[in-house]
Amino acid sequence: MTIKKLMAALFATAGLAALPASAANIFIVNFDGPGEGFNDPTPAAPVGGNPGTTLGEQRLNAFAYAASIWGANLQSTVDIYVGARMDPLACDANSAVLGSAGPTFVNRDFPAAPGQGTVVAGHWYHIALANKLAGEDFVPDFVHISARFNSELGKPNCLAGSPFYLGIDGNAGTLIDLSTVLLHEFGHGLGFSTTTNGTTGAYNGGFPSIYDKFAYDNDANKAWNQMTDAQRAASALNSRRLVWTGLNTWVSALFTLDFGTPQLQITKPFSIAGLYQVGEAAFGAQLDDKRVEQKVGQVVDQTNGTGLACTALSTANAKAVKGKVALVDRGVCGFAVKAKVVQDAGAKAMIVVENVDVTPPADMAGVDATVKIPSVRVTLATGNAIKGALAGGDDVKVQLEMNWLQLRGADRLGRTMLFNPKPFQPGSSISHWDTSAERNLLMEPFINADLTHSVKPPKDLTLPMLKDIGW
């Protein structure tokens, strides 16, 4: 009761930023104190379509702009209130938490209002969606989404020189576009997140979320609302095998995502034959330009049996990789350095083996215009499988290629992948699209510079996903 009275008092005294009439009315509730956040009086020149003349006013305008985009794309007879504030969040010179948002409540087993959709029994719904489906506000004294964003961004101790861009025209350049960040975080509050514990697999209060109904593991052949706790915990680490099965998203992905998925196919020996995930290189030939089909030759230039390929190869190692795909280990020197070393020894391509147990394999940075061969990165498990076959006397034959029949960021059936790396990343795992998606999507765990302010196809898949769960 004390919490409810406090929230009601804040609601009564906070300033409301009303939005133009739209399909769903979304209001920003200013929870900042005098002189801070939205109330910061620091003078600011209007920028990028944002007419505010103080820092606080521009921030509030950006919030209202993002809310208006979501309001124009959603249908609800119940007003949605977002409690928002600007606070110092975790950050340092090299990284920062930009913001966070989520539902203030979840609800289940409520009756749907006529014409508002279907409620799946025994599943949690974020409160804004529950209100929409029921046609009534279950928590009239509370905000429905709670949002916090970093007030320190761009200061010397917090990604210095990279503040939020407060314009609403999408021309952020090298700055961080606040409107995009807001659209992303509001998406979480509207329903793009599970209420289930991804680490333990345990349901919230013993019930799955509606999100779990559509999160499907391709190896377990089950959705999250059909699994045991242990199965969900394992699925949360089963990288790029967890997909979204909602029909709206599946259809929309066909004209939103790009075709062409990089892959490693081992064709020999039979014992390890199959398709394997790869990370791409920023240097050298790209797989969409050059397909390679060759045997694998392993570099072993260290006494512990690893092959770092950081300096010119010995005669034996050069002979092992000439005309083949060089298998090297991550570590000590840059990826482009390794590629140049094995290229100079006559290798046709390079596979870099990860040196820790993480998945999926990350892309490889580096610059060297003299590198002309393609390179990929594989997991430690994939690398060990190849090494084991080679050690057993088998020839290993691989194809490095682009699968032009598979959407980038989707499985072979066209279902968009969810983000579930190993190790588990609290706050990011499960409740985002996978980072392999191209075009880049709003609800990936990272804000990419090429994102637009659209939440629907052909620019984005967030709106179709929200329609899948009931919006």
Image (tube, rainbow, N blue to C red):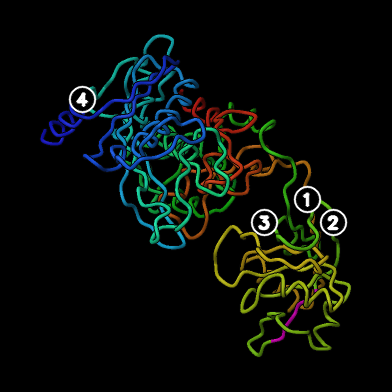
Query: Where is residue 21 shown, x and y percent of the image?
Result: 42, 14
User: Which is in the foreground here, disc 1 or disc 3?
Assistant: 1
The residue tagged 3 is: 277
Majority SS type along the magenta span: loop
The residue tagged 2 is: 291
Mark 1 and mark 3: span between their CA atoms? 11 Å
Q: Earlier in the sequence, mark 4 or mark 3?
A: 4
Q: Is residue 164 above or below residue 11?
A: below
The residue tagged 1 is: 402
Q: Earlier in the sequence, mark 1 or mark 4?
A: 4
Is there CB contact under 8 Å for labels 2 and 3? no
User: With 20 as the anchor, is 221 left or right in this view?
Assistant: right
Point out the stretch of residues depicted in magenta.
297-301
Identify the amino acid type marked 4: Asp
User: Which is in the foreground here, disc 1 or disc 4?
Assistant: 4
Can residue 224 be seen in this snapshot?
no
Query: Where is residue 247 shown, x and y percent of the image?
Result: 59, 27
